[in-house]
Amino acid sequence: MRPGRRLLDTVPAWMEAHRDAARRSLQRRLQAPILSLISIAVLGFILALPAYLWVLLDNARALSAHIDHDPRIALYLDAVEPDTVAELEHHLESDARVERWDWIDADEALAQYRERLADPGLLDWLDENPLPDVIDVVPATTDPAALGALRDALAAIAPGAGVVSDDDWVRQLNSLHQLGLRILAVVGALLGLGAVLILALATASELRERQEEIAISRISGATHCFLRRPSLYGGLITGLGGGVFAGMLLLTGIALSRAPLEQAAAAFDLPFRLALPGASHLLTLLLAGLLLGWLGARLGSGHALRDAP
Amino acid sequence: MIRLQRVTKRFGSAAEALSNVSLRVDPGAMAFITGPSGAGKSTLLRLIAGLERPTRGRIQVNGHDLDRLSPRAIPGFRRSIGLVFQDHRLLFDRPVFDNVALPLEILAYRRPEMRKRVRAALDKVGLLHKEAANPRTLSAGEQQRVGIARAIVHRPVLLLADEPTGNLDPALSREILRLFDDFNGVGMTALIASHDVGLVESMGKPILHLEDGRIEARATTGQPA
């Protein structure tokens, strides 16, 4: 504690020092608005691209909910004992993974089939009904792993039953979605790394312009933290600006691509509507901007201050 | 306050800038270092301020053994020192007030206290009316006084000045040295490098004379190591 300074003064003084650093950093940006706007624009573009791809992927996944084709599991019961059938029914009632199930009686199925035939008399040639009783299960989930587990559980109860699941399209859509997410993660990480390096370069060159101030401050006893503080606030300002700009780009991009995408979906008879990103997604974009801005400033200032006289 | 024991400084493979220099400046004392350009005056001050490390020898300043000072402790040590440069080294992107306030900002002073101290320092050097001016608009003498105000605003225990009168006319030079004498009068230890032997001698303070990096002669009180 320096003479004449009270402990109670140190916290407000610390806050004032931070406010001053932030204010000075903002002033410096306002003095060179073009360079600052270029940094903000670069960060905005870099953030907006993966965000836009993510919105498309997310909407594509949501598309599966629009398709009127739930995954099904059919249990063919021709070689199953009545006791096992009862056990199956009991299980289907209690399993939370089952949305609903229907018993399709073999005779009813044959009757329905007869109605659809152009010449129902053909069926009279059969000695007996070739169709088995069937339980048609509508699962409560579209998650491929959960569907597989349910199918295995039902097959274990009735080993003699033919268990056929109709969830290939869910698996395909899901694996495509997973692949898309993976590609997005790689692209996002590479772009993020690029953004950090660009912002680090900008921070380092800004610090080079402040070399005399840094030298005088060092001589006057400034710590590394004190010297770096305005740069870190600068990074946060750029990050905030970049995040806001990315959000605007994203909303504009969605607005522009909405009509053609919905027209294309309509051509496939899909009731698809491109949803706008929610507030939480825009907030994530903002936080990503702040994080990248801060990381770039930290990397650039650490490097520049280590080399400064 | 300052104690150098057989200190040598060599820059790369060049000749020694300082050779085997030993000296002592007691707390509260004021002393001058004289000598021609290149004699090693600036090097000596930079070593005492911890801006350079000696090639050999031991330096103690204000109770710190500079050899053993960790990098983390260096900022704290420098805050106890005020430095005045011949070329002022003012920042032209901000007004006089902000230049003088810089050491207080580093020390995280609060605004009201900072204002009080900066105004007191500017008043002391006779430039209170110039606090809002850009240093670029000031004369050389005024710029030097702003540099002095910045060096003493945080009330350091030791004031080091490197040719503070280098670019000034004799009347202004005397005025600046009188300022240092005033600071010394309130307990600040001062070590001032100057090539102007006549002016320095007129102050009646101890003088160390440097020639080719060696102390050639010294006068009067409290300095032999």
Image: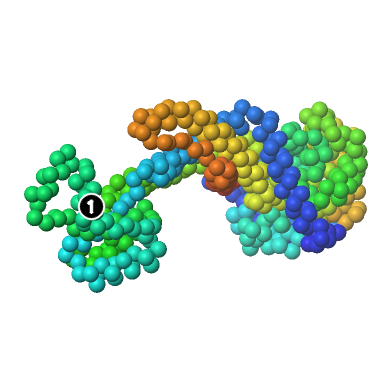
Q: Residue at x 27, y 56 (%)?
A: A104
Q: Which residue is mark 1?
A: A109
**Looking at the picture, how far across and down is residue A198, in whole percent?**
51, 37
| Front one among A71 and A60 | A71
| Front one among A3 and A116 | A116
**Looking at the picture, how far across and down is residue A126, in whole percent?**
9, 52
Asked where in the image residue A73 lies, by quadrant, the reply is bottom left
- Whether B2 is drawn above or below B196: the answer is below
Q: Residue at x 17, y 55 (%)?
A: A131
Quick check: B6 left or right of A292? Answer: right
Q: Residue at x 48, y 42 (%)?
A: A192
- Whether A231 is drawn above or below B154: the answer is above
Which element type, helix, strand or loop, lies under badge 1? Answer: helix
Quick check: A268 left or right of B80? Answer: left
| Front one among B3 and A61 | A61
Quadrant occupied by the N terminus of chain A: bottom right
Quick check: A127 left or right of B23? Answer: left
Task: Using the rendered image of the protein, determine whether residue B31 is visible from the camera's viewpoint.
Answer: no
**Looking at the picture, how far across and down is residue B55, in whole percent?**
59, 54
Task: Using the rendered image of the protein, determine whether residue A267 is visible from the camera's viewpoint.
Answer: yes
Which residue type does callout 1 highlight? Answer: Ala
**Looking at the picture, how far across and down is residue A220, in whole percent?**
73, 48
